[in-house]
Amino acid sequence: MTATATTPATTETKAPTGPGMRFVNWGANYIEDRTSMSGLVKELGRKIFPDHWSFMLGEVALYSFVVILLSGTFLTFFFQASMAPVVYEGSYPTLKGVEMSAAMASTLDISFDVRGGLLMRQVHHWAALLFVASIGLHMLRVFFTGAFRKPREINWVVGFLLFVLAMAEGFTGYSLPDDLLSGNGLRIIDGMVKGIPVIGTWISYLLFGGEFPGEAIVGRLYMLHIMLLPALVIAAIGVHMILLIVNKHTQFAGPGRTEGNVVGNPIMPVFAAKAGGFFFIVFGVIMLIAATVTINPIWNYGPYDPSPVSAGTQPDWYIGFADGTLRLIPPGWEFELWGFTFSMNIIVPIIILVVFLVLVAFYPFIEAFVTGDKREHHMTERPRNAPTRTAIGAAGVTFYAVMWAAASSDLIATHFRLSIEGVTHTLQALLILGPIIAYIVAKRISIALQKKDREIALHGYESGRIVRLPGGEYIEVHEQLSDYERWRLVSYDDYAPLMVRPNANGKITFGTKLRGVMSRWFFEDRIAPVTRTEIEASKHGHH
Amino acid sequence: MAGTDGAAPGTAVERHESAPLPSGVAVISDDRVENPGFPPYRPRVSDTDPVKERQNERRVFWLFLASMIGSVFAVVAYIVFPIHEGDLGSVRLNNLFLGLGFALGLLGIGFGAVHWSKSLMDGHDMVELRHDTRGKPETIARASEIFTLGNKESGFTRRKLIRNGLLGALVLAPLSAVVIFRDFAPADDPATLLKHTMWEKGTRLARDPNGVPIKASDVTIGSVFHVIPENLNDSEHPLEEKAKAAVLLMRLNPEDLHISEGREDWSFRGIVAYSKICTHVGCPVALYEQQTHHLLCPCHQSQFDITREAAVIFGPAKRPLPQLPITVDEEGYLVAQSDFHEPVGPSFWERSL
């Protein structure tokens, strides 16, 4: 680890003096003698972090998780995870005397009888929404910049697990207050679980401790929500961070930056101040939202009852894609065989969700197979410079977005005065066509941008200055780029389709054939980076 | 320059790998544009102008001071805006001012620290060299030697019998714990439970939620009732029973109903009763469109046509809502003739067995 800095000449190792410093020195030595902490500080203290706005998305996720832990701990001191029926006697007037579960009653007490209780509930809920959202955006950033490539494939999978765990945390938490909406959410989960072949009925029965809704589920989800899942999340974050340190952070191309170095700010002091400050900003923004915007007003919904449900109800945003998929299945997808019921209207959505998530988790390995590139990659790519990947990502985002929009099909219909049938049929068509269109458009845009970059790198940019030549001809003067500016446009990895050739035994294996086909798909349309010769030629042969 | 200084202008650090790894279908060109090296440092105003530097320093302090004010304000708000029982306005004020105080306390620290780092701390880019993630050959050789020694000294691969014995034991130990999950739920068979509801011959249809029985004469044409069994609220598990037994009762013009064979006497003068639990995933099918006689499930938009025995006309559900056979008793109250003739609610594997 050769990090370094000399610039501020004040960082001499001579021990500072003064009464305060004597105590600090004594404390530092006390800890050092017992922990050998200096080694860690030496290794990490001046570690370099590159700077780019998009690198902050993962930080938002991390910090909102800390906020979730803090606010959640406060809530556990008051919440009672019990479905035992009680008569509500708290201070919310309209529900006084209503029978409800202890969970619902204690949630109301937190909201209306504990100072700051409602605030902490809202902080917790908003932070949870932000947590999943920032993980999603962070994943998109990593995907579209190719930051998942070797050596970071494993960390991509760890991050993916965190995404799934975050959704599980969200869903279990959403179900705890035992209000009408969360009960309906559980009812839908129950219905989905029952549709799973062979084991579904039993899984639902064991999960709910008997028939739906039972009196067990809130207590069980609570245990998952505050113990098992957070433990897994913390463990996964630990692994995620350790791998981040081992692999070091990726960086965007820039003059002086190479695959062999990291350019940016040292942890001590710049990055620590920036990141530490940013934690407080994230916390502060969540606090500001929680202070001013109501979320999940369970007192308006009332306690869970299997009979009523209001129209236009929706899950938290990150479960939307699952709920939307359920809505998009056409009528009649269920059949019986040998007396058993196959609920394809449940099984197909589950398969779609699982396949989608598995593809997300395994994408790095698919691309690694296609390129066959075993080198380490530490330069993040601009999305345009990997057109096929960008197109695949756009298709995936569109697919997700359609599933997600489908969870609001009824609201879209009422809001825009459309028929629910029309909205559903449109979304069904979009689920298939949308990704195809997005793929083509994204790929063409990427290639067009690459062409533009190429043009600018070779001929400079339009200066807006029109000059009339002595011969009467008008031209626009192009300003040449500096070497530093040009470097950003010309330094990217270039791949070409595999030339399929027989191996040493004179055979073309299936793997080679497959790689041939897939690399043609990925790299057939390619804009090669500008070369030195081309730049030389353009400098001489230019008007 | 490597490893000694901040990025000096005009230098490029090239990577030196021990052995180049296969690059697959990557195009390796020796005509690549050369890395121009680090650009010269562009000083910030606070680097060159001491006035600006002091100004920035003051700004950072003001932000920290704002934070302190916010935190003190939060404590004051906690006391000054208490919650008065039953007064929702007081809850709102407590939430707002406490939250604003906290937010200012946090944002002041955050913006102060970030501003400090961006405007006053050393702004030079610094460089750190990367190393291959893969360890040095010596380290790898030593690691593999350790595994070899471990294997040799324990005989892990040589003593196949005990090794396989250990693996078997390790597999079986957690598997044996699976059985204890059985008592997560009572002893009954769920498939049997799901096939029955509280309804039986003579159970009166009552209003949801108060349990007042419904007379046939109360049900006018075009009206709809949310119905529960009369004895539901006295049952041992009212929520579980209600989740299966909830019913919608509607009265249509008898000639609008297309009644199939065998169900001729399941309705009474155009009054029909259908399970309210959606056959898709079990939401209550609560929205009745009086003009078209369609029922809509608000969760996933399955639609059922009541004139055609709740047949599915749209949405992901497959099966019609089960019909509850009804009649009237001698006092004129609507009663069930029997339980549903098929399981209600979402499909499950053993449903038709």
Image: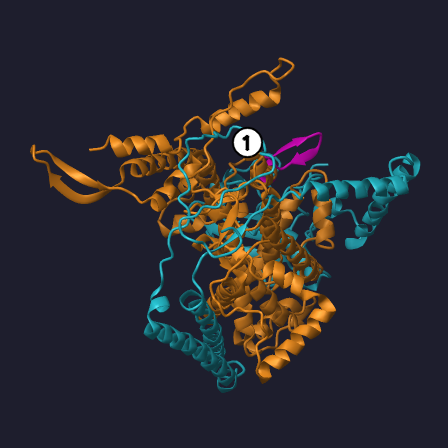
Chain colours: A orange, B cyan
- The answer to if A45 sits in the magenta stretch is no
In the depicted view, which residue is nearer to us: B348 or B111? B111
Residue situated in front as seen by the camera: A130 or A176? A130
| Kind of element beneath mark 1 | loop
Q: Can residue A316 be spotted in the picture? A: no
Q: Position of residue B351 (x, y in %)?
A: 69, 40
Left/right placement of residue A510 relative to residue B78 reads: right
Residue at the spot of label 1:
B23
Image position, residue A5 (x, y; %)? 51, 60
Q: Is residue B348 above or below residue A521?
A: below
Subunit under mark 1:
B
- Tell me where residue B275 appears, x and y as whole percent: 59, 48
Q: Residues within 10 Å of mark 1 (few under 14, many from 20)?
A: some
| A357 relative to B240, above or below | above
A336 inside magenta stretch: yes
Q: Is residue B328 above or below residue B113?
A: above
**Quarter of the rendering containing residue B32:** top left
Residue A305 is situated, as x and y percent measured from the top left of the image, at: 60, 60
In which quadrant of the rendered view does residue A342 lie?
A: top right
Say whether residue A275 is left or right of residue B182. left
Q: Is residue A258 visible?
A: yes
In percent of the image, x 71 and y 61: which residue is there?
A: B235
Q: Quadrant of the C terminus of chain A?
A: top left
Please report the bounds of the magenta region as a residue range.
A333-346
Residue type, numbered disc 1: Ser
Q: Looking at the image, which is closer to me, A96 or A111?
A: A111
Figure disc tally: 1
